[in-house]
Amino acid sequence: MKLATIFVAVAAAVSMGSANASGLLGDAPEEGSKGNLDFGFVTTSGNTDTTSLNGAFNWVTRISEPYAMGFTVTGINNATDDVRSAERYTFAWNNRYDLSEKDFLYGTLDYVNDYFGAYDFQSGVYFGYGREIFQDDSGHLSLGIAAGYRVNAVFVGEDEKEAVLRGDLDYAYKISDNAQFTQKLTAIFGEEVDTYTSESAVTAKLSDSLALKAAYLVNHNSVVPVGRDKTDTTASIGVSYSF
């Protein structure tokens, strides 16, 4: 697969739909919409060790005073010597309904399709309660706990279907006028599999709409099929366009 083909594949993944803010939507605007489009260079280790390109499209909108909604789509596609070595797509639809200044209900529908990961795909739906610990000019911190149902689809054999509990953390800190650190954590406790996901990122503004972004993603499944690694990591650096 040529480099141009990889660019096209990533662009297709990015434009498949809408985007990923945190599941808690702690960065939802008070009114209107906002989003960002990311492209970057990625190195991965775990079930795949490769160099690739990645893309992400994130969008969140304030539909009414208490209700916000957001979408996230990400894609990674890579090949070495014309042999595909990494291909992963994710989608999340996030909803938040504010009950008060601090308390809110939230719901998430997500889907992860990883051709070279521990599972063929994982998909779930979750509903829960969240609490805004703080939100001011320096950043925000939100926590949430939810119940849900998830499918872990294996490549060979019978898929795992399970009731789960989910915990979420969404943190952002303004380092300076032009730089910000974000941390998103998700822990899903299932009858069959526990999954832990951490995304740490630093963005540095180049202009009002353009920024450099460095991120590190860790995904861990407590139980995986034979021959698969429990932990995957993705380190990326690239450009983020905000709109």
Image (tube, helix red, strand yellow):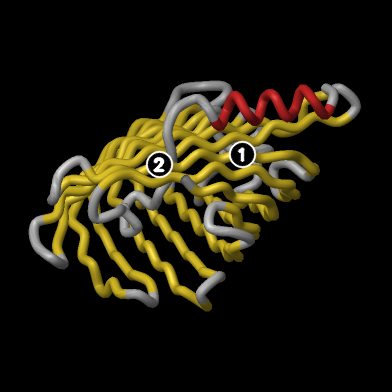
Amino acid type, callout 1: Gly
Q: Please, which residue is most extreme toward the left here?
A: 99
Q: x%, y% of residue 33?
A: 33, 44
The answer to whether residue 183 of the structure is visible from this angle is yes
Locate the N terminus and report the quarter of the image it occupies: top right
Assign a secondary structure to mark 2.
Answer: strand
Q: x%, y% of residue 139?
A: 38, 72
Q: x%, y% of residue 178?
A: 55, 70
Q: How many marks?
A: 2
Q: Using the rendered view, name the quadrant where residue 19 is placed.
A: top left
Left or right, residue 90 beside residue 46:
left
| 10 Å crowding of disc 2: few (<14), some (14-19), many (20+) | many
Whether residues under marks 1 and 2 lie with C-beta atoms below 8 angstroms apart, the answer is no
Assign a secondary structure to mark 1.
Answer: strand
Left or right, residue 212 beside residue 80:
left
Amino acid type, callout 2: Trp
| 10 Å crowding of disc 1: few (<14), some (14-19), many (20+) | many
Disc marking residue 55: 1
The answer to whether residue 167 of the structure is visible from this angle is no
At horizontal 20% and vertical 40% (from top left) the residue drawn is 63
Disc marking residue 59: 2
Please tell me whether mark 1 or mark 2 is closer to you in this view. 2
Left or right, residue 53 beside residue 195:
right
Left or right, residue 43 beside residue 60:
right
Give above or below for 97 relative to 168. Answer: above
Q: Using the rendered view, name the quadrant where residue 61 is placed.
A: top left
At horizontal 9% and vertical 56% (from top left) the residue drawn is 99
State the residue in front, 72 or 125: 72
Q: x%, y% of residue 44?
A: 72, 48
Give above or below for 215 relative to 6. Answer: below
Q: Please, which residue is most extreme toward the front here?
A: 208
